[in-house]
Amino acid sequence: MVAAVHSPGALRAALQIRPGEVDFLEIRVDNFAADPAALLPVLPRLRVPLIITVRHPAEGGAHNLSFPQRRELFARFLPHASLIDVELRSFEKLSATVSAARLAGVKVIASVHHFHSTPPVAKLQRAIRQAYAAGADVCKLAALAGSPAALARLLGVFGKKQPLPLSVMGMGRFGKISRLLLAQAGSVLNYGYLDRPNASGQWEARLLKSRLAELVEA
């Protein structure tokens, strides 16, 4: 279970999180890019492992950050990371960031976001192969789940053996349902919020963890 920290309110809530309530906190550094120096001293006070993300503007990133700005922010926050999240589209231009993470023993998530549609399974499968070829440790796929057919396409990626672990989630009308189904199907990182959603279809993180535990016990 991953809880997103994308606002001052979420950061305040994250400081109250105890080990076991969630498994990771995702620090959306791009949302704090106006004053990242104020965020850094807070991170050692957080009590669960951190995923560091500096998101590309075309995939939901804040502050329209350039690649040089993103490289600099990743470098500043990398010492606090257990994982980093880099969009698959950014792997080439952020290759130095990815290499630095690997040297530091930090795992790398290759992410792909489709906010307005769910691509065919073949296109999703192609992204998974590209993430594997790029050396990612996890491939994250997020797409609009606006219909039963779209949800079925997301579930479809679990219908065959994959070359690396997947984190898959839906947004929109079937977003909440998708996060239960896809976690049950094998999604290894499942995202929720602490103070308010930062994507449609999210659950509150601790509630989602509780619901998933109920499914495991059923």
Image (cartoon, rainbow, N blue to C red):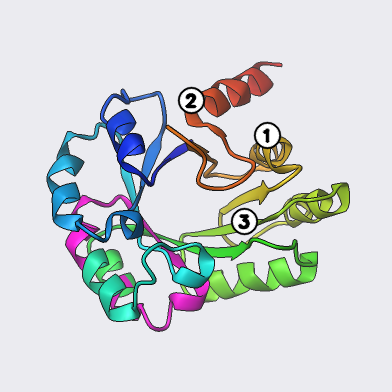
Point out residue 1 in the picture as x, y percentages from the top left corner: 48, 35
Q: What whole-number distance in Å separates the C-alpha atoms at marks 2 and 3?
A: 20 Å
Point out residue 164 in the picture as x, y percentages from the top left corner: 56, 59
Among the 4 quarters of the image, the one containing residue 161: bottom right
- Say what amino acid the circle numbered 3 marks: Ala
Q: What whole-number distance in Å separates the C-alpha atoms at marks 1 and 2?
A: 13 Å
**Residue occupying the point 26% across, 30% down:** 15
- The secondary structure type at the circle numbered 1 is helix
What residue is disc 1 on?
180
Quadrant that contains the C terminus: top right
- Say what amino acid the circle numbered 1 marks: Leu
Q: Earlier in the sequence, mark 1 or mark 2?
A: 1
What residue is disc 2 on?
206
Residue 142: give its label.
3
**Residue occupying the point 43% across, 77% down:** 91
Badge 1 local density, few (<14 within 10 Å), some, or many (20+)?
many
Tell whether 167 sits left or right of 146.
left
Point out residue 154 in the picture as x, y percentages from the top left corner: 74, 53
Residue 104: give its label.
none
- Numbered range of the magenta stretch: 75-97
Among the 4 quarters of the image, the one containing residue 187: top right
Q: Earlier in the sequence, mark 1 or mark 3?
A: 3
Task: Relative to 80, say whether 192 is above or below.
Answer: above
